[in-house]
Each structure stands twice: as structure tokens, then as C-alpha cells.
Amino acid sequence: MVDSSLKIYEAIKQKKNILFEGAQGTLLDLDHGTYPYVTSSNPIAGGACVGSGIGPTVVDRVIGVAKAYTTRVGEGPFPTELHGEIGEQLCDRGAEFGTTTGRRRRCGWFDGVIGRYAVRVNGLDCLAITKLDVLDELSEIKICVAYELDGHTCDNFPGNASEFARCTPIYETLPGWQKSTKDCRSLEDLPQEARDYLKFLAELMEVPIAIVSLGASRDQTIIVEDPIHGPKRALLDENGDPLSNKQ
């Protein structure tokens, strides 16, 4: 047993690179997730500081990881869940089964409302989009851009699980690419429709996509921009100006 906080602090003073990796997902967070369908800890980025014993000011960059579609394990609201053939296809092609339990994961279209919420509560600087290849065979792909809640359009994540359970998704539909992306090694290698899909996600969530994963192998990864040493994402005001420039 060691004092991990001290070890990390000493490494930081020696200008060593430290990488924290979180587990689970934002909506399972004890404080910011869909309570009571949550875990017992804080999977959000801030939890890395709590768990490691370092202050938030030493974290230079936060990278979010999201699949090109949405999944959920166990109970809880899931507005974009697919119950038919496409949902089965996503589960089978994406091997969406729990590593330990073998439990089948619920699958659905990408939820941009959840995505924007995750960007906000984690303070993400960039995104890694994984399993884009799972969508290769689809003729069209839907993305949730907002919810309908009690007759009103809701652009932001609801305040509690009961409201979340009443949400129905509002979709934008994009054409699929219907060709394999597994051998693509640069953004330019991807079909135009796949690039359009990624661009739509980045604009919807207001954060750049730095990494695209197209399979389980390490070489099935496209580095769009440097995820480690890239610029910090500036928060913008309602006029689109960086808040960091405000006095």
C-alpha cells in the first residue's frame, strides 16, 4: 500500500505525463446520473481527482469516449432504444455483451442530448468515437437532437429520471454509407457519408472529434487531431466569443 496521491504529485513535479482512465459512463454517476439507476461512485472526469487525491487544476485535458451509437446496461430510461432488427444488429455487430456477466446490452441510436450533457459535466476538450464500423451496413442512421417532454421540445438533459422516462426522441436522419470502414486509416479514407456523420456529431455536441475507432485492433484507429496535446476547448458565450477572454 502506498500514498497514491503523493506518488502522483511527485510525478507531476517531475513533469511526467499522467493518464487517468475512468470506467462506466456519465449517466451511471452517483450525483449526475439517472438516479436511482446509477453506480456507487463518480465515473465523471471529476471523479479522477477525488479517486487519485489530486486537485482539478493539474488536469490539463479531458478526453471523452463514446460509441457511435448508444448503449445501456440494466434498467433505466433509454429514449433512443431500438427493440427491433436494427437494435439486434447493433448488439450483435458491436458484441454488446457484458465482459464479466455476459449480459446483453440495450442498444439504440446516438443520443445527442446525452452527449451534450456529458460534454458539459465532464468538461470535455475532445472526443474519441468508437465502433463506427458497427454502423457500416445501415442504409440510414438516426441521431437524437432533442426530446419531446410533456408536449414541449427539450434541448437539455432532464433534471430527474422520471422526466427522462417520459422523453421521446426527436431525430435527424442521415444516409448510411453501406460499405466497410474497417480498413480505413485516415479521415479521407472514410466514405463521405461516414465523415458527414462524424461532422454532425461534433457540431451537435460542440466539441471536436480527435479519435475514430473502427475495430478492436490498435491499427484500426484514426487520429484526427492530437488528443493529448491539442488546445483546450474554450467555453463560448451566447455570441460565440470565448469566455476566457472576459474580464
Image (cartoon, grey):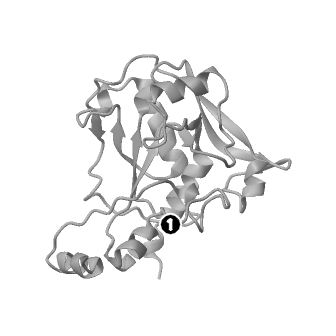
* 115 in relation to 41, above or below: above
Q: Residue at x 36, y 80 (%)?
A: 55
Q: Residue at x 40, y 61 (%)?
A: 233
Would you name the residue on which mark 1 appears? 42
* 44 in relation to 195, above or below: below
The x and y percentages for residue 180 are 37, 19
The x and y percentages for residue 21 are 35, 59
- Along the viewing direction, whichever of 31 and 62 lies nearer the viewer: 31
Residue 240 can be seen, yes or no: no
Residue 156: quarter of image: bottom right
Quadrant showing the N terminus: bottom left
- For badge 1, the amino acid type reads Asn
Q: Is residue 11 left or right of residue 213?
A: left
* 169 in relation to 207, above or below: above
The x and y percentages for residue 129 are 41, 42
Q: Is residue 88 left or right of residue 18?
A: right
The x and y percentages for residue 5 are 29, 79
**Secondary structure under badge 1?**
loop
Q: Residue at x 41, y 16 (%)?
A: 179
- Along the viewing direction, whichever of 164 and 28 lies nearer the viewer: 28
